[in-house]
Amino acid sequence: MSRRVTVAAALLACAGLIAGCGSRPAGVTGAGPPLAAPLSTSLVTAQGTWAVAVMGGPDADNKFWQLFFRPVTGGRWSLVTPQGVADNGGLVAAGGGAYLVVGFRPSQNLAFSPLATSTDTGRNWTPGLLDAGLADTPGAIAVGPSGRTLALLQDGTVEAAPTAGAAAAGRWAPLTTLKALAASAPGRACGLEGVTAVSFGPDGSPMVAGSCARPGPAGVFTDAGGTWRSAGLVLPAGGRARVLGLTAIAGGTVALLAASRPGGTSLFTAWWNGTRWTVSAPVTADGVRAFGFGPDGSAWLLPGHGRPEAVAGAASSAWRPLPPVPPETGTLAPGAGGSFDALAVAGSRLTVWRLGRGAWARVQQVTVPIQVGSSG
């Protein structure tokens, strides 16, 4: 069955359950420090590298989120966006084991989020459904090595499914809520305002992160048999912390955080091995257009202005500036040997630039069939 038919079937199934699909009110996950978490990102799985970018016209109704894939062996990017569902609201993607799960944020007056799951690098998709709207953050979905899946909703509720297959079948159960986390001892200590990301710890237990109103501890929490505890992350520079992204790596977890202080906003990467945190030196930014995580605990960010920055991992925790990106770059994607691809968007055209020997070289163009003025 084609990708278009399989994912569209999820919407048809939901149409028969429309009362349930719109049963939960949309909410917010808290304001926190001024930097938000943009949906443009990239992630690396065992199958290869995935990138999420927004394309289309200048108006909000003519913007369409697209998913691209590059095999682990390198080579060319291909368009693998699950078809048949309006994606004006944004895409959220997460990988674990053999699974890649994509969530569609609500748009076109929908109050729920269709899902799509692939085990063959996006060639085929199995439809699914989350009976609520996903949060507006790239960390709204997480898939563990066992296939256990977490979803962060717009109102700060976190739901869990035992496997990616169960998630596709709609077998979700509440794990915690913003209200419960904020009322817990670690939540009160940081003044938890909102939930921004979900992931898994080194032992496979769920993790939840958010934004704090009080300076000092960062809002990173672990589930210890149903009791939420602080993961013990404190930024050396102090300030009010907001977790922009959280991801699991082999033997640990990586977080990207923004600390808001009177002198400005600094960004940090922090690595956790289950017992202690290693925190990078700070880097300043006047905004974040995109960010993502790479292999071995690496991370990158594309600021609102200026040069992008990358950090290799906990063993080499200093940020390094990359050359200024080509015009219209929407997101970056890590490559072999510390290289990067820059994905630049102009309407329905994606241009891929590859970093080598300190300069960007154009290596590919992809034309995406977008009908400006359409809804999906």
Image (cartoon, rainbow, N blue to C red):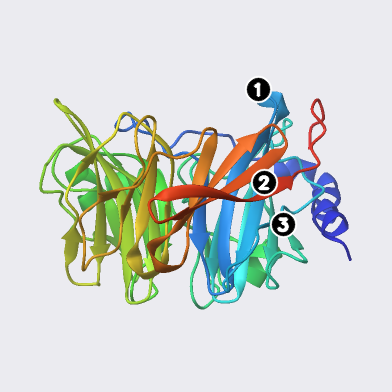
Residue furthest top as drawn: 59
Q: Residue at 36% x, 56% y: name it.
A: 299
* Quadrant containing the N terminus in the rendered view: bottom right
Could you tell me how far apart the alpha carbons at marks 3 and 2 are, in whole angstroms?
8 Å
Which residue position is annotated with label 3?
80
Could you tell me how far apart the alpha carbons at marks 1 and 2 are, in whole angstroms?
16 Å
Please give left or right for residue 101 compared with residue 337 in the image. right
Could you tell me which secondary element the residue under label 1 belongs to?
A: loop
Which residue position is annotated with label 2?
66
Could you tell me how far apart the alpha carbons at marks 1 and 3 are, in whole angstroms?
23 Å
Q: Position of residue 63 (x, y in %)?
A: 68, 31
Q: Looking at the image, which is closer to me, 222 or 319?
A: 319
* Quadrant containing the C terminus in the rendered view: top right
Q: Earlier in the sequence, mark 1 or mark 3?
A: 1
In the rendered view, tell whether residue 286 sits above or below residue 140.
above
Q: Residue at 83% x, 59% y: name it.
A: 6
Tag 2: amino acid: Gln
Q: Position of residue 27 (x, y in %)?
A: 51, 33
Q: Is residue 19 visible?
A: yes
Report crowding for label 2: few under 14, some 14 to 19, many 20 or more residues within 10 A (C-alpha).
many
Please give left or right for residue 248 compared with residue 17 in the image. left
Q: Residue at 75% x, 44% y: name it.
A: 367
Which residue position is annotated with label 1?
58
In the rendered view, tell whether residue 240 sits above or below residue 253.
above
Q: Looking at the image, which is closer to me, 8 or 61?
A: 61
Tag 3: amino acid: Val
